[in-house]
Amino acid sequence: MAQSRQLFGTDGIRGVAGEFPLSKESTYVIGRALGHDLVRSNSKARVVIGQDTRESSTWIADRVTAGLSSVGVKVESAGVITTPGVAYLARAHQFDAGVVISASHNPWTDNGIKVFSGTGYKLPDTHELAIEKEIFTILQQGDLPVPGAQSSAASIPGESSLRQDYIEWLLSNIRVPVGSLRILVDCANGAAAAEAPELFRSCGVDATIIHATPDGRNINANCGALHPETIATHMAKSQGQYNLGVTFDGDADRALFCDAEGNVINGDAVLLLAARDLHKRNALPANTVVATTMSNMGVEAALKKSGIRMLRANVGDKYVLEEMQRTGACLGGEQSGHIIFRDGEATTGDGLLTALRVMEIMVSNDKPLAELVVDLKVFPQTIQNVRVREKVPLKDVPAIQKVIAEAENDLNGNGRIVVRYSGTESLARVMVEAESEEKVRRVAATITDALRVHLGE
């Protein structure tokens, strides 16, 4: 059986800033281990590094930069930039790797390190495992020459031009003029604040920008894609002032939307409207899209009516992408708003690119967002989190397996249950879909109660 990773989750290494594996020593070691991995292939390796707006992002970027530099890797900083911005720069500027310092939707006290290859793709699990082994080897050696204060990685000359290159690439993807739209944009006080205002201004959109004043601690705080109810409230109160609401998460690799009445449009609905658009243009290979185990049964049914097949991958946009590559699909994504368009050059989910695509579809069809997904009948669904003391394989806990089996019998084929661990937090996630809200609540409560009894903190 393949060895499991201890540091890398579904989206890089993540934890509390200042604590292992994101202490000042371990972040230096992570940079050094990544550097060792890179110089084996290229003795003159180059890395681009970017970060979100957390107050810890700058010093973590400094430490990773120092670790990379210690083995001869040249590091260039893009400063505050979205995660997909770093992925684009890695491939477009032929870097050997791209590194992002971000914990995405997590609280400001957390942070993370994500790594892209020089082709702009997230590293496969096997490669992350190899880097992990290198990290632990260096830590065990001890007596590391950990340097003192470093110049900020976010102040290296050239970062503004790198960000501008990314914005210009996004603009080059626009195929239908979108300047007729008025939009409300929530930047989550995160990385999108560095690019979204200029991007939307440059494509002629009348955009009102909110939550774009990061202070190091307000990222995702009651705003952004983690709290779509915030932009929904703004949209509802605006009484039709805007055609569209767009809300990003902390590193803007995903986006959620609101229609003019303030109804939240999630990633499932975006997959539906994007798939139909590509299908209409004969640009959807094999009439197939890739979603995840968490996507609602309703979107699968709506796609089927349009002659489109939906495949399910494990949760995590890297796993969606792997399934897309395996099957040749050009569209995939997650309910949470990670949408991957492979009909162009994108290699990962990109909230800004997704926003542009949604706007194009609205304009080219001359329809409001609500009308484009009006036939989507969503099964009642809940996703509940249970904090766990350790991530014991669920198959190894018979009592929990028994409860899940009984719950599935209760649904009798008219619903779905998915129980999985979060790849980024110490949480078990329980997703239940059923034909009624009452059954959803009852089944979910039974399973979450069992998880708390047997695995809870």
Image: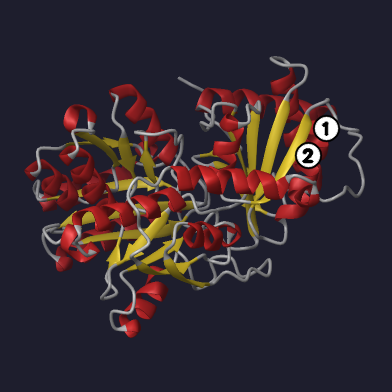
Q: Quadrant of residue 340?
A: top left
Q: Are marks 1 and 2 in contact (CB under 8 Å)?
A: yes
Mark-to-mark CA distance, 1 and 2: 6 Å
The answer to whether one can see residue 149 in this image is yes
Q: Is residue 2 above or below residue 233?
A: above
Whether residue 139 is visible to the viewer of this picture, yes or no, is no
Reading the image, the residue beneath label 1 is 69
Horizontal arrangement in the rendering, residue 206 relative to residue 39 (left or right): left
* Residue 257: percent from left, percent from top: 34, 63
Which residue corresponds to mark 2?
65
Q: Give residue 349's quadrant in the image.
A: top left
**For residue 6, above or below residue 442:** above
Q: Amino acid at mark 1?
A: Ser
Is residue 44 left or right of 292 when viewed as pictured?
right
Q: Nearer the viewer, residue 441 or 113?
A: 113
Q: Name the residue rendered at 27%, 71% in the picture.
A: 263
Residue shown at 55% from the left, 60% from the top: 198
Q: Position of residue 368 (x, y in %)?
A: 22, 65
**Nearer to me, 435 or 70:** 70
